[in-house]
Amino acid sequence: MTPMPTVHPLLDRVLADPAGLSWALLWREVGPEVELLVGDVRDVDLLADIPTATAATPVLAMVPFRQITERGFDAHDDGTPLRVLVATQTERIPLDLLLGILPSDPVEVTGERFSVTDEAYAEIVTSVIEDEIGNGEGANFVIRRDVVAHTDTAPASAALTWFRTLLTDERGTYWTFAVHTPGHTLVGATPERHVSVRDGRVQMNPISGTFRHPRDGADVEGAFREFIADTKETEELFMVVDEEMKMMAQVCSTGGRITGPYLKQMAHLTHTEYLLDGRSTADPRDVLRQTMFAPTVTGSPMENACAVIRRHEPDGRGYYSGVLALFEREPGNGAPVGPEALDAPILIRAAHLDDAGEVRVSAGATLVRHSDPTSEVAETTAKASGMLAALGLRPRREPSHTPVLRDLPGVADALEARNESLAAFWLSPQGARPDPDLAGRSVLVIDAEDRWTQMLAHQVRHVGMTAEVRRWDTVQVEDVLEPDLVLFGPGPGDPDDPSDARLAQLRQLMAARLEAARPLLAVCLSHQVLSRLAGLKITKLERPNQGVQLAVDLWGTPARIGFYNTFVARPGTARLTRGGTDVALEVAAHAEHGVVGLRGPGIASIQGHAESVLSRDGLVTLHALIRHALRPVPSPAGADA
């Protein structure tokens, strides 16, 4: 049946021939209208190749997960294109009007199956916990599985129907969308902004922790209060905030400020989220490249997470966990055209259709040290439920069936209480506060494959020092001799692994710095490497410290610090040769968690992450360690002045 004409001629063209055009329908939380883009499609190789938007031609990019190889990270190459829709025509349609004219007849979907069975996925969960997290490869990892089905309905027509259902049934979404291009059609309702750039303001919205709404009649309030108090859910959110703060510290000159936590309530699930906010002068494409992709869909540290995903997922992710990226022009404020803006939601809670009629809905669970395999299996099923309900494969749920959870008594206070143990530095405006004794002094920060170094560099600059971050394999011995301080950074892995070239390089660079009697500071993995050089034994913890806050005593000063480690140095006599002189190191130790710090003439180290959001006393601790390392070292007795 031909749709009745409307006052929206572009919409009429799409409804009359959905498969004959390339188009996108976007409902964004910023307004009551749905945006329709129709235009030309091209595939490009790199994010830098995405055309520039003009006032008349916004540009929508479909960015697949494999694009993360632009950052040098691992990914299955499944050939999914970086596809660009350059809009030649646009239209805005009131939501109520659109709901009245989009197709609503059911689309038949058959042959539903999981790409990975419940039993096989549970085995993967166990393997990741024991073999990856348990061996120091990272704090958390997201492994996906897919619901695969088939429809004989043309992809463009099916997407229009499911888009209408999502607009009607779902809530709490950041974007609800349908995008049709030749061979690739996407439709979904994602709760999560990955990154946006507008007028130099960068925002990210890490979402983690998943409350599965009970069936009608169940004790929703009681179950939700248990969720809010659950340690795993809380730690999971803090870990992804830490990972996205690494990105914010890299792309924003002012680091990034955290606000929240907030609730993101959808029809089937509720999540907790924070808002990260900072300023940047970078091109939006550079911001997008440096932040590929969200740790909520990959894990941390990011580089190792990609390697773990490639080991445990049998094939590529397509567009799942990539982004839609809308580039458009801001108002010009008197000028002909304003700066280019970016709005990029994460491609989750979505269905991908191809021309053969395959429908694929992907979902992943965040696996942490105390994940339960059965629960993680259920989480992947729950995360897919909203999209599967739109497909007609699960019962639809009216939004009114679950109370507004943020309005329940005590919920706001319980959420706010989470911040009491966090670092005030990241929760507050971060204007520089130079230390006159440190201002202008140079720091080389060596990245050992974990971008905690970006947060460390930001805190170093906060106290007035200049910081340069360089990856370990770009640093030579001569490079570590000149800076006032060399800060050896964190990274994944076993510090005693004889096959790891990165560890051999760290040892060589530390040895050169020690021989030159120049100040150094080591963090986490580098602290373990330094401890080994000092003669201490390294062992593996029975239960990894991944994303936990510990109370420690650092030479008489109590501190609450965030820890992300699987290996520890054990207390003992610690000695190093520095500038030809044998020196003893003071050891700060914890009864259960081993050596948490070392210090000596021109030397300081810490096992925890002073830069972490979890480190309530982090900035003060880092500042003290820097001052100690740079303290003048008296000449040995009897030596020439």
Image (spheres, rainbow, N blue to C red):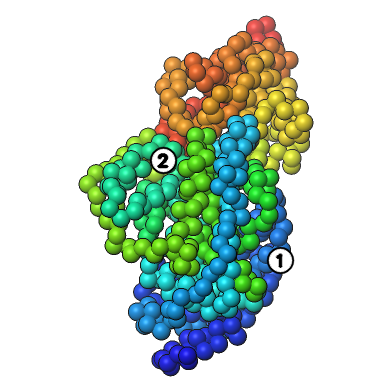
Q: How many marks overall? A: 2
Find residue 291 and report its image quarter: bottom right
What's the distance in space between the residues labelled 1 and 2, CA to CA? 38 Å
Residue name at image x 64 percent, y 34 percent: 131
- Kind of residue indicated by mark 1: Asp
For residue 480, above or below residue 278: above
Q: Which residue is mark 2?
A: 234
Q: SS at mark 1?
A: loop
Closer to the camera, 228 or 607? 228
Q: Of the residues shown, which amino acid type is indicated by label 2?
A: Thr
Given residues 607 and 493, the one toward you in this image is 493
Quarter of the image holding residue 566?
top right
Task: Please say whether residue 276 is visible from this viewpoint.
Answer: no
Task: Determine the secondary structure under disc 2.
Answer: helix
The mark lying in front, picked from 1 and 2, is 2
Residue 257: where, in percent of width, then height?
43, 48
Residue extending farthest top: 638
Residue 27 picture location, percent across and down: 43, 72
Q: Is residue 59 above or below residue 550?
A: below
Q: Position of residue 207 (x, y in %)?
A: 45, 51
Q: Is residue 603 above or below residue 366?
A: above
Tag 2: Cα neighbours inside 10 Å, few (<14), some, or many (≥20)? Answer: some
Q: Identify which residue is drawn at 69% across, 19% down.
A: 533
Q: Position of residue 7 (x, y in %)?
A: 41, 91
Location of the C terminus by quadrant is top right
Label at residue 45: 1
The answer to whether the residue labelled 1 contacts the one labelled 2, judged by CB atoms less than 8 Å apart, is: no
Residue 189 is tagged as none
Answer left or right for 467 relative to 559. right
Q: Is residue 560 left or right of residue 451?
A: left
Identity of the residue drawn at 73% across and 35% down: 502
